[in-house]
Amino acid sequence: MPIPSLNVDWRGYQAETQRLQTLLPSLAALAPAHRKLVAEIVMVRLFLLIENTLASVGAKILCGAKYLDTTQPRKLVAARSISAANGFMRSYGRKRSKRYLSWTKSQDIQDNLSQTLNPADPFFAVISKHGALLTEMRYVRNHIAHSNSGTRSNFRKVVSQYYGGLKQGVTPGLLLLTNALGPTVILDRYIVSSRVVVKELLRA
C-alpha cells in the first residue's frame, strides 16, 4: 500500500472541529433545553472524533507515515496495512492479546503502542502531557452517553473542579455552556484544546 500521510488526519481534524465550533454562536438563539442538548451532541461528536483520529494516527505511523515535521516515528515493527497495524498493536510482543484497542484513556492509548513504538517516541510524551484533559473530556462524554451511577461520580469530579465543590442541578449540557474559566464556554475550550493535542501529536 502507498505510504499513508498524517496530513489527511490533521486537515480533517481542523475541518471537523471548525464545523463544531461554528455551531456555538447559534446556540444562543435556541431555548435553554435545546441549547444544552445540542451542546451535549457536539461533545459526543468531538470525543468520537478524537478517538477516531488517535486510532488512525496510531495505525498510520506503524505503516510508515512520518510526523508532519518530517521526522520518522521510532517504530519497533513495520506494518504493511492498517489492518496489520491494528493486529500488531493488539498482539505483537504481548503475552496475551488485547481483545480490542481503546482510544479513550491516556493509559490505554499509550499501551496500544507500547510494544510497537519506541518509548522515547514523542507520541507518548504528548499523550501523557494531555492526559488530564482527555480524562476530563471522557468523564463528561461518558455521563452524556451513559448517565449511570459510575459516570455520575466521575462527572461530579469535573463539576467540583469548575465550581469549587458540588453544585446541584448541573447537567453536562449546562457545564459545557458555562464560562466558569473566562469569556469562552467550556465546550469551546474543549474544542480548541483538543486541536492543540492533535497538532502536537502530529508535530504539525
Image (cartoon, rainbow, N blue to C red):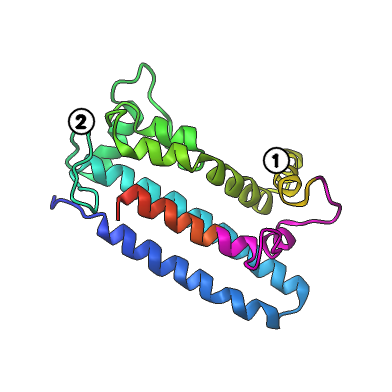
Direction from residue 196 to residue 36 in the image, left or right: right
Is residue 192 placed above or below 99 in the rendered structure?
below
- Residue type of the residue flagged with mark 1: Asn
Expressed as whole percent of the image width and height from the top left, the position of residue 100 reads: 43, 35
**Left or right: 73 as drawn, with respect to 157:** left
Nearest the viewer among 75 and 44 is 75
Magenta stretch: helix, strand or loop mostly: loop
Q: Is residue 167 above or below residue 42?
A: above
Q: Position of residue 166 (x, y in %)?
A: 82, 46
- Judging by the rendered image, the residue that carries numbered circle 1 is 154
* Camera sees residue 111: yes
Question: Disc 1 to disc 2, how far (Cα)?
Answer: 37 Å
Inspect this view and state whether residue 102 appears.
no
Residue at the image point whose x is 71% and y is 63% from the top: 178
Q: Residue at x 57, y 58 (%)?
A: 44
**Which comes sooner in the sequence, label 1 or label 2?**
2
Q: Secondary structure at mark 1?
A: helix
Q: Which residues are magenta?
A: 165-189
Query: As shown in the figure, which amino acid type bears the numbered disc 2?
Result: Val
In the structure shown, which secondary structural element does the residue marked by tag 2 occupy? loop
> Which residue: 58% across, 46% down?
138
Can you say whether 181 is above or below 107 in the image?
Answer: below
